[in-house]
Amino acid sequence: MHDIADLESRQIPGVGVASSEFIEAAALQSRALGFDPAMVFVPHPIQDRTDEEMRALADAALADILRLLCAEEGDTSG
Amino acid sequence: MNENRVLDPTAEQAPAQRARLPRPTSVEGKVVGLLDISKPRGDVFLDRIEEQLAAMGIQVKRYAKPTFTRIAPTELKQRMAAEVDLLVEGLAD
Amino acid sequence: MKTALPDGLIVVAKADCPTCRLAEPLLAELSARAGPLTVYVQDSAEYAAELPGTLYDATLEHSYRLGIEFVPTLIRVEGGVEVQRTYGWHKEDWRQLSGVTDLGEDLPVMRPGCGSKTLEPGIAEELELAFGDIRLQSREIDFSTVDDPFEACFERGWSDGLPVVPPTPVRVLRMLKGTQRKPDEVVGLMPPDLVPCTVEKVAINAVLAGCKPEYMPVLLAALEAALTDEFGLHGLICTTMFGSPLIIVNGPAARAVGMNSGVNALGQGNRANATIGRALQLIIRNVGGGRPGEIDRATLGNPGKYSFCFAEAEDSEWLPLAQERGIEPGRSAVTLFPGEGVQGIVDQKSRDPESLARSFALSLRAVDHAKLAMAGDAVLVVSPEHARVFIDAGWSKQRLREELDRLLLAPGKELVAGAGGITEGIPERFKDMQVPKFRPGGLLIVRAGGTAGLFSAIIAGWAASGPVGSSAVTREVNT
């Protein structure tokens, strides 16, 4: 999340991807950073997934990632 | 001096947090960077994201942090900022 | 908030104070014979702990509300209201106040007390913020998890590119003590967002800038001047041209806050010059929303947009700028001018006023463009050595100005668009006239700088002068 915040300060919009275990920690980090990065959360666990399962997680996350990388109709920069 | 709180010097018309950058209307024609934080299995995830983006005709550049335990080195951040238009970082768990 | 005090006697003490320890054995007696007795202990739960009326005043709220300066303090309360108090140990006073006529028989006649914990450095302001009458209205931002408060201020966009001082409530409270005005008083509507700017917001940005509290009256006067309709701050912020507010300070206040009117007067190194000018810029940025790349679209800008503020060197026979503009002698004032930068005039040979005035006039032609006229105003900053040339010849500022006005007339045909093979220029209809460089009153003259150097300077003004843009505004400094 620090990296996303840093790249945004270099004018590169970013999206972070993390497991659902990270949701609370992400909220706390965001307060400390004074910045709430765009985040996509994928279902825990990660470490013991097969390659097939990881690819399925990626396919499922793709739509959200693309949505957060682009501006929607009537979107403000939030 | 206790610096746990400060008073807002602005007109307070915006939220106290910094806003996200405006996004482009579409990823077409943009270079998307994929930054691997180097935790195990993250590469498989990002490989698939890369495949999908390439299938959409989007140019992808891959990067990796030396370790997930530290923020990205400055040199890497500068390089990414010069080479991509958008960034996806993962996979944290 | 005035709640009733507990009736009877109140003692405020510190376990750490030898005189309080001396008096400690007496408290049981007072409680029994002159009670009820309330004991507020500032620093410990171990003092007079056995008495029913003892309270460890850990937050110091009671001590603050009682206005305790020394410990021990003994107070008598009747009907919820204080009627008498004494501090330190004075046998006679304690006996009289408590009515216990043989109190402390074997104690010395007197022992001085110690300072109250409420007056220790740093604590007094925290207490005032917690329990006092002052009400700060700005949103508090939590920095408790922030690693570096200076970086955090940068990240939130509050900076002009240089570090700012984190505006903690204690720093802001101290800054507010520099003015008698109330924090919630609205100074004016701040462009470009046209948001009400309170004295509190001024103080917060003054902290960011690095001001001292005593600078507040000068800063407030500058802000008032900047917010007048005549000064046209909104247009000045939005212009693609160079200008931004320059603050020229006159009167005793300049010296009182230690401003620089001498060596390097237009440069860096003096805290008052640097931070008063900077605070105004930060208010424009943070309160008004005027930021480069957003509303501020200046093509080039100028370094004065970090800060541009100096004092006139008044110890001469020349009338100070503020007095020329109607301020009474002995009063302090600021003059706001839409300044664009500094252009040097090197003249090390002229020894008579006529020659030096011609040098000045020739250089002044270049304001905006040598072929433009009646556009920007200008400030002519005359160094002490150059001023001496005029003063020794008996020329007042006004005399110099009249000479310059004469010298700055030019034949319209030289200035019209296309003349001299230069497309820029004034409209054709002026070609048969003598055209003045500046509009009436558009040239301001101040004296400043070190005493060695035959160099003066021009600070050009925004090309939109007068009602279409900005005029200089002078405002008296109050408290």
Image (cartoon, coloured by chain):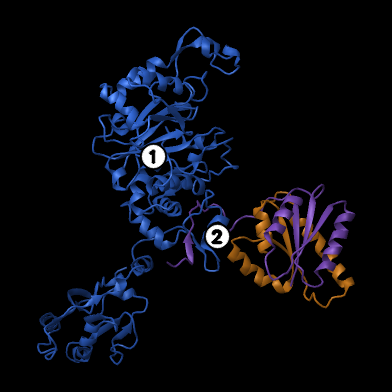
Chain colours: A orange, B purple, C blue
User: In the image, is residue C478 above or below residue C75?
Assistant: above
Protein chain holding label 2: C
User: In the image, is residue B2 above or below residue C208?
Assistant: below
Are there few (<14), some (14-19), or many (20+) residues within 10 Å of tag 1? many
- Residue C409 showing in the rendered view: yes
SS class, disc 2: helix
Quarter holding residue C53 = bottom left
Where in the figure is residue B8, as x and y percent of width and height? 49, 57
Per the model, the C-alpha gap separating discs 1 and 2 is 33 Å
Q: Which residue is mark 1?
A: C265
In screen coordinates, is C219 left or right of C92?
right
Q: Residue furthest top?
A: C432
- Say which mark, if any, is on residue C152: 2
Which amino acid type is shown beneath numbered disc 1? Answer: Ala
- Say which mark, if any, is on residue C476: none
Q: Are marks 1 and 2 on the same chain?
A: yes
Where in the figure is residue C230, as x and y percent of width and height? 42, 32
User: In the image, is residue C322 above or below residue C70?
Assistant: above
Q: Earlier in the sequence, mark 1 or mark 2?
A: 2
In screen coordinates, is C48 left or right of B54?
left
